[in-house]
Image (cartoon, coloured by chain):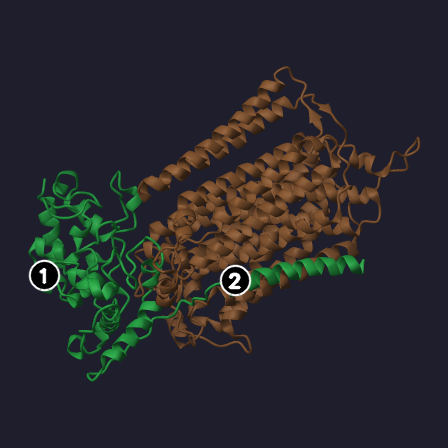
Amino acid sequence: MILQAVVDSLPAYRDFPLIGSRAAVWIAAEIHLMFAAFVLGVPMFAVVAEAIGIFGKDQRYDRLAKEFTRLLLIAYSATAIWGAVLTFLLATLYPRFFAYLTAIFGVSMWVYVSIFFLESFTLYLYYYGWDRWKYGRAKVGHWALGILLNLWGTLVMFIADSWLTYMMTPPRDVTPDTAPGSIKLWHAIMNHTWMPINIHRLIGNVVFGGAIVGAYASYRFLAAKTDEERAHYDWMGYVGNFIAIAALIVLPFAGYWLGREIYQYDQSMGITMMGGFMSWLWVIQAFLIAVLFLAGNYYLWVGMGRIPGAERFRPYTKWLLAVLVLGAIVWGTPHTMIADSRELAAMGGSHHPFLGALGVMSAKNTAVNLMILTTFLSFLLYRRANSRPVVPWARTGTRIQGGMFGVAAAIVLFYGIRGYFVEAIVRIGYSVYQVGAVLSCIVFVTVIDVLMGRGAQSLGAIQWGKMPPRSQYALFILAVTFTWLMGLMGFARSGIRQHWHVWQVLPDTTKYAATPALGQAAIMISVCVLIFLALVGFIFWLGGLAEQSTFVPPPPPRPPAPPPAAGKEAQHVGH
Amino acid sequence: MWAINLKVLGVVLGTLALYTLIANKIPQVQSEVPRALTLGADVTPEQLVAAGEQVYQGAGGCTTCHGLGTRAPNLLTDAKGQGPIGARCGRREPGKDCKSYLHEALTQPGAFVVPGYEPIMPDMSRTLSPQQIWAVIAYLEVQGGTVTVSASDIPAETPGSRPGSAGGSGPGLAGGSTDPMTVIHAAGCVGCHKIGTEGAAVGPDLTHVGGRLSAAGIREAILEPDAKITKGFENFAGIMPKTIGDQMTANQLEALIRFLAARK
């Protein structure tokens, strides 16, 4: 009762000078989230890299993992600072809403800080023990610390996700009259969108971690003073880009699950998201993802210039580019959008002919699946560029691979075209067949390729470092685009609550309750991305200031050294 | 080094500027907070239409589905030569004039679903006040027709007339009638469910529902429609309104459950 009396005596809201309370919380939450994605994505990257170093006996990966763990130390502080800023802003600007959340989630908040504490000290152990536990069992134990670090990070994220998903999809038995203290914690956590958001963010963090690693490597590549250093950071950029694009391919499926859960929870919320005032947001999203596909593929195609033997695949790139551009155009075609009477009159009716043909789900699913197949083909060509299989069944294997691509593309096209002639309910089911065909193709073609690559004849080592600078700017564009896309999707997720703090339970009655249009949201997103990237740049600079890069130039060779790009770092044939 | 830094900064700022510019060039739509509407006894048709347009384009969220696209009929443009909604509304349902039809479409959307469309229209009385609903009707009438809504149609605003305030303690559906078929019609069940020869086959057939569901199962299906989805109807999950039970009195709900459970 005392607690309730305290809550009742709180003012509902306070305002923030100049930019207003909503903008203040928006910036704090967005930048905290971006740093959180960074400190969750990069440890995943580091622990995988360390494992490759241990089990593949390739020291480069171990050095790579350590280099990024060093940056994590500073990034953790930044994450915690922005988290504290967000908490203080919420507690002072939205005191009643904050009190409402703490009444339900108080216990989970205590657990959250405890795990964050454990996570921080695991990170210190992980980093500072790197050189102490370097060999044998101790090294495996050190790697286990990395896994533990990821486990803590994932738990922290899952707890924070429960708070924000409760705001979107509170359990159905919670009404405006339900006392927050009477809501069971686990009941509130296990809300409709909790697990889909968890999975979506988990994969998204891998993408983000890969993209940031790529951007870091590209900057160091451009600033490199020696060929060896350039070769090291060229390789690092390739690894970052590979991880980001590989995880990006899976991300839409997690997004599809999340969207489906939102529709199942509340049809009108789903319609608001996909067809309501947010309908244009998906056109912008399509544009951004087209940029990601094009920049990722461009980087691979330019990268083939440093691989002996790749020239035989070069004529195909223009066709790959054509498929990607056409796919992007179709994917970016709007379907349902808000139009007022004047716009409808100007259109001459309710349907534009192009929108009817290309803006529908059949066309979009076909386009995106073909873009994924094309990107995978680009990667496959890159992978095989400098090797010639020697297994006796190599020709048959290649034909089977080609056949798999053909069958997958045919299935995607068949169901895409057939989708125009069936009802919506049947059409939705077709996307499963299309996705299934593409994923099966990726899995089976990769398995065949790995088996076929055994003992393959090398056509020459990859000349790491021999990349034109323009390719590195593609990695920057990828990192900026991933970060901006994350801000945009955050706006979509949060914006569908419209004028509710907690959907249909706790209304927002501030003067900022109306959900802003996309233009204003884009300005906010760009400001947040800029602040975040500036701080990340500062962290990278600090990392370089405190300690030299973990790149270690090879010892003076005896007899005389080979040409720089063909040194130890450049001798690696594989990818 | 400075040249590299400047180039990197240029790429970052250029990319951000491009995305911000594109997002600002597309149509800008803000999701407004629904506002209370006060219409006096001397309200003019022009004032009603103006208020209705604001609700239609904003807080009502009508353009979400009735805009450009195939999800729901477009109301502001011609449909199959019949003109905009104001011109065709009087011919939609036999025996219903334009005003009555539009009121039914907004407050009991399941009662009549335009052929070729799915019954996804929500009951707008959950989110709009009666004043807002009548203003929207006036706005729709004027699209190819004339306004027949007048001040006498509009109830005075009381705390109880606000959306969602009726809860389960009000008089219930159809004036509190406990005749099951009257309740079924008033709740718009036949918009999606078949009962005997009546109704549409969007949701599970209720003709013999008592044979497959107990009284408790029927109660759950009404009060928590998504708790268990009938096999074969998974893709329609989420369509059935979750507030139908709230709109009935306890007597109506029990009468309806007994009636359906007896249909073996």
Query: Could you give the CA–CA distance between mark 1 and mark 2, rounded to whole angstroms?
Result: 48 Å
Residue A525 visible here: no
Pinpoint residue A494: horizontal percent, then vertical percent: 45, 60
Q: Residue furthest bottom?
A: B42
Q: Which mark is residue B95?
A: 1
Identified at 61% across, 58% down, the residue is A79
Q: Residue at x 49, y 77 (%)?
A: A15
Is A189 above or below relative to A531?
above
Left or right, B5 with reference to B75: right
Which hue is chain B drawn in? green
Of pointers 1 and 2, the one earlier in the residue sequence: 2
Front position in the image: A379 or A107: A379
Report the front residue among B84 and A251.
B84
The amino acid sitting under disc 1 is Gly
Tell me the SS state at disc 1. loop
Identify the residue position indicated by label 2 in the image. Answer: B23
Q: Is residue A459 left or right of residue A340?
A: right
At 28% from the left edge and 57% from the top edge, which residue is drawn? B73
**The disc numbered 1 marks a residue on which chain?**
B
Image height of A331 relative to B243, above or below: above
Residue A227, quarter of the rendered image: top right
Q: Is residue A132 visible?
A: yes
**Where residue B101 sits in the image (x, y, percent)?**
17, 63
- Decide which of A480, B206 is in the foreground and name it: A480
* Residue A18 point in image, percent of width and height: 56, 78
Q: Residues within 10 Å of mark 1 (few under 14, many from 20)?
A: few
Q: Colour of chain A?
A: brown
